[in-house]
Structure formats: C-alpha cells, structure tokens
Amino acid sequence: MALDKPYTDVPGTIIFDAEQSRKGYWLNQFCMSLMKAGNREKFKANERAYLDEWPMTEEQKQAVLARDLNWCMRTGGNIYFLAKIGATDGKSFQQMAGSMTGMTEEEYRNMMVNGGRSVEGNRYIGEDGDAQAHRQPQGSAGQAAQKGN
Amino acid sequence: MARITASVYTSHVPAIGAAMDLGKTKEDYWKPVFAGYDFSKQWMKDNKPDVIFLVYNDHATAFSLEMIPTFAIGTAAEYKPADEGWGPRPVPVVKGHPELASHIAQSVIQQDFDLTIVNQMDVDHGLTVPLSLMCGELDPVKDAWPCPVIPFAVNVVQYPVPSGLRCFNLGQAIRKAVESYDEDLNVHIWGTGGMSHQLQGARAGLINREWDNAWLDQLINDPVACAQTPHIDYVREAGSEGIELVMWLIARGAMADVNDGKVTGKPPRVTHRFYHVPASNTAVGHAILENS
C-alpha cells in the first residue's frame, strides 16, 4: 500500500522524507564530513578527488561540483546537510536559499526585507504564484530569460 | 517539589547568533529583532529559573543520517557549542542537569513516550541562539549561562516529524515528570524554532505573517485546537521549515492549565509577545507565558 504523502502538490518544494533520505544518504553524509576543518581543507584542495572517496552517484557529484542546490535536493540532499557545503564556501543561509530561486543575492535580500515571499498563488501546484514552475527563474534572471523568448 | 512556572517561545535563526557574535546587533537590519528581546532579557534576570528545559531541533549537527531519534533528551553534565561549519559559536559551554534529566527520562518513558537518552553531544544554534537571545552576549570563558539546561531535541529534519498532538501530549508528560521530582526547583520550558520560513527550492523565502499570528493566538488561547493542526498546513502555509513550530506545542502542553489533554485550569498570563520579519530567511516569533 502506498504511503500517505499529502505534500507532493506544494510548488517549489521537496519534502525530505524517508524515500529522499534513502536516495541521498551518501550525499548527505559527505556533507556531514565537512563539519571537520581538516576535511574542508581536503575538499577545497581537490573537490573531485574528495567526492570520489564517497559512494555517491555521479549525478550527485556533478550537482555538488556545480553548486546547484536544487539539483542536489532532487538527488536526495537535505538543506541542513547541504548547508555544510555553503559554510565551506563561506556562504550564509540566506545566500544559499536565495541561490535556489534564480534571484540575485540583492534581489532575494530585498524580497525578505519587504516581508518575504507571499503564500498567495504558492500553496498548490497549478496556481500562478512566483514559486510556480512556469515562472522560473525569478528576478532579473527570469526577466532576461523572458526577453530571450 | 519541582515546578514549571513559565514557558518561553522563540525562533532560533542561526544568523541571529552570528549577528550577536560579530557585534552587528546595533545595525539597522538587526536593531528591531533585538529590541523585541530587551524585555525578555530583563524578565530572565527578574525570574531566573533553576533549570531550563529547552526543546529545540538539531540541524544535522549532533545527529547525521546515521541515527535519527524522534525525541532525544540530554542527560549529560555539559554540552559544547558545535562547529556547524563556520566554527563553534563563541558562547559558554552549556551545563546540564543530569539528575533532573534522568528523572524526566525515566518518568516520561514510563508514560509511554519512547525517548532516546543522550549522554554525549554538541549543541548547535537551535539551542544556543535562544539562550543568547534571552540572556544576552556572554564571554565564552569568563561568563556562564544563568542556570543548567536540559536539551531536548526533536526530529523535524526528516519526515515524518512527530505530530502537533504528539508534541502537545508529550508536554503534559514532561510536566508530570517535573512535578514528581522532590527537590524544589523553578523550571522553565522553552519551545523554539519557526515561525514561517522555507529554506529550499523556488519557494524559498516564504513568509506568512497572517498565518503565524493566527497560529500563535490559537497556541495561547486554544492549544487543544492548535495541536490538531496537520503537518501539511504548516508546510503549505508556513513553509517547509515552518514545521519546526510543532516544538512550541511541547512547551505549551506543559503549562498548568492543560490536564488530560484538555484546558481545565486558568489560562497562563501572556507576559510578552513579539513578531518581526525578517531575520535572514525567517519570521521571528517570540512569547513568554507564565502560569497564573
């Protein structure tokens, strides 16, 4: 019998459940290793070689090398674990969260200062809020993409 | 006997800790956040507890994916501030209360809550930021936190997290456990995390001021109904990380007006309440309730 997963219809959101956790086990454990200063140094010295020490999938390694946090999450990463990569790069939580929206750091910061992202249109997939798939990427990156169409 | 006299609710945003550690609290961005805690710092001095029972969540710090306890109680003598990747926060070591913690563990397990007992762990921003907000800046070596702390970690990282109702009932069990401890101790219970925030995906940055405040009204005035809020409501309305709010229900369930799952006593006094957007990605909520 299927598990009860009422959260798959929330736009722009991946819930880290048992299935994601199983997929992302080694990706997240690699992230965990970056809590030790010595491992951070080793990773920075040769990222690919350090990643190859872990039984991660090739896709997970590519996602880490690209610092594409949305991609990392799709392959089972969890933001609290992925934050260790950001910390290694000297990035704040706000910079990391912002990077997943396509907005520039300034655009994202301004959105937060102005009260954050509205929930209107962003509760269910299929509405028209700014977190919906058809409105990505956001910010000036999104405007540039639209002009290109 | 030991008694729970008050409950404190507060967000535990890591950037708040960083702002304090780096001396940024007077900057325009941060001033309104810390202004909301001026009252609370004075209140802590005037109402110093003997022990703080601090409900928080670990953020992939002490618990990796190797072990994921749903409820974990710290029974150690002390806990070091963790290195979460930016280096440990420069705050005092957290002293525990092994005797009361062990007593609570035994009593709560006998009340059918399966706690994990932890004798060795570091504590992350989830625990140290609330302490900093309520106690102010302290020197990591010369100063100490005002009293011993019992860390109580709740899994809100991997779904499914415990339900609001389970947390609310657990709070009641914790109160019974505290009240069966012979020594006269003034205990505060803190529920931390939240309020609305989402740290992931295209929906990152979600804030829901209206929902947060309605939820907090209900937590204070009708906690039995608040405990019925399903997980999906937190996710949809308050963001994927807004689910941390279930931890506030543990503290609320431990207040004196709640008995056998119902509100039967006099409601607690709302000593302080504060709300501000934003701190980094998050809506900051804070309240102090005292038993009448």
Image (tube, coloured by chain):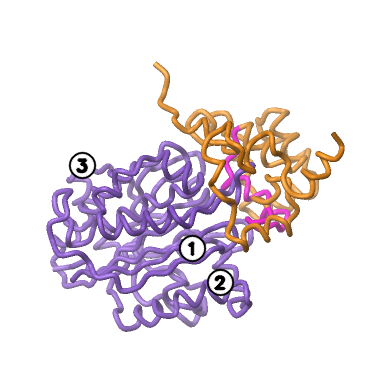
The kind of residue on which mark 2 rests is Pro
Query: Bounds of the magenta span?
Result: A76-95
Packing grade of label 1 (10 A; few <14, some 14-19, many >=20) is many
Q: Nearer the viewer, residue A143 or B263?
A: A143
Left or right: residue B112 versus residue B190 is left
- The chain containing the residue under callout 1 comes to B
Gap between marks 2 and 3 measured at Cα: 38 Å
Residue labelled with disc 3: B112
Residue B67 occupies quadrant:
top left
SS assignment at label 1 = strand
The main secondary structure of the magenta stretch is helix
Residue A124 % position (x, y): 53, 35
Which label is found at residue B284?
A: 1
Q: Which chain is purple?
A: B
Q: Which chain contains the residue that carries disc 2?
A: B
The numbered disc on residue B90 is 2
